[in-house]
Image (tube, grey):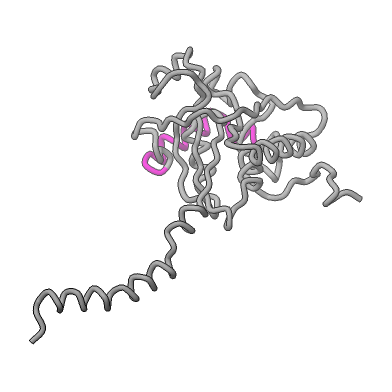
Amino acid sequence: MPSLQADQLLQRVLLLPLLLLLLLSHPLGALAASEQEAVFAGGCFWCLEHDLQTLPGVLTAESGYSGGRTTNPTYKQVSRGGTGHTESVLVRFDPEQISYSTLLRAFWRNVDPTDGAGQFCDRGNSYRPVIFTANAEQRAAADQSLLAAQRELGSGRTIAVTIESLKRFWPAEDYHQDYADRNPLPYRYYRWRCGRDARLDQLWGQQARSSRVWISPPATPANAG
C-alpha cells in the first residue's frame, strides 16, 4: 500500500492543474490593473460623494481631504482653516465601464464652477472646487474639460475651478462616509437648504448633475469641421 506521504504528494500534483486554471480565468493582476482613481473637490463631500458614486462604472467613492499641508487632518482642523486642505472625494472606477473624461463631466455639472470662495452655502477655502490630477494624462484631460465647461456655460461666466497636482488623499472620519445613504433625511434637508440643486439647475439647465457629452465641445482635429 502507498504511504500517507505519497498520497499527499499525489493529491498536490492533481490539484496543480485546477489551481492553474483558476488563476488563468481570474487573473488578480488584471483585476487590480483595471481599477483607477480620481480625486475631486466640490464643496461638501457628502454631496459630491453621493453624486459620483451612483455613476455606472464607479466602484467606490470616499470622502476625505486633499491639497493641504497637515498630516492626517481631522474634520475639525480642516473646517477651522489653516491646513490648506479641501473637502474632497476619492473615486475608484473601472475605466472599461466609465472613462476619466466622463467623470470630469459629472464633476463639472455637480459644482458651481464660477465660485472659487466656497460652494453654495458652504464658504471658505476648505470648500473651494478643485480637480486633483495624479499624472500628465489626467492633467491633459482636466485642462480639456475646463475648456469644454467654459463653452457650455457661455462666455459670460468665469471659471474658478483650479486644477492641481494631487499630493495625497487623506480619508475622512468614518461618520462622514456614505453619509447620504446612512442619513437620508438630514442629508436631503441640508442639500435643499444649501440651495445646491437650485444653483446647478440655474447654471447647467438640463445638463445639471449629468455626465452626458458636452453640448459645445472645443474644436479638435477629431471633431472640427
Query: Toward which corner of the image does residue 17 lie, by quadrant?
Result: bottom left
- Name which residue lies at 54% across and 24% down: 127
Residue 225 placement, left or right of 206: right
What secondary structure prevails in the magenta region?
helix
Q: Which residues are magenta?
A: 181-200
Taking the magenta stretch, the answer to whether it contains residue 182 is yes
Query: Toward which corner of the image does residue 176 lie, by quadrant?
Result: top left
Q: Quadrant of the N terminus?
A: bottom left
Location of residue 113 in the rendering, given as x and y in whole percent from the top left corner? 67, 29
- Name which residue lies at 48% across and 29% down: 168
Location of residue 201 in the rendering, given as x and y in whole percent from the top left corner? 66, 38
Query: Toward which corner of the image does residue 202 lie, by quadrant?
Result: top right
- Name which residue lies at 65% across and 23% down: 115
Q: Is residue 219 above or below residue 9?
A: above
Location of residue 49 in the rendering, given as x and y in whole percent from the top left corner? 49, 39
Location of residue 107 in the rendering, given as x and y in whole percent from the top left corner? 61, 39
Q: Is residue 119 above or below residue 53?
A: above
Q: Nearer the viewer, residue 178 or 68?
A: 68
Q: Is residue 193 above or below residue 38?
A: above
Taking the magenta stretch, the answer to whether it contains residue 192 is yes
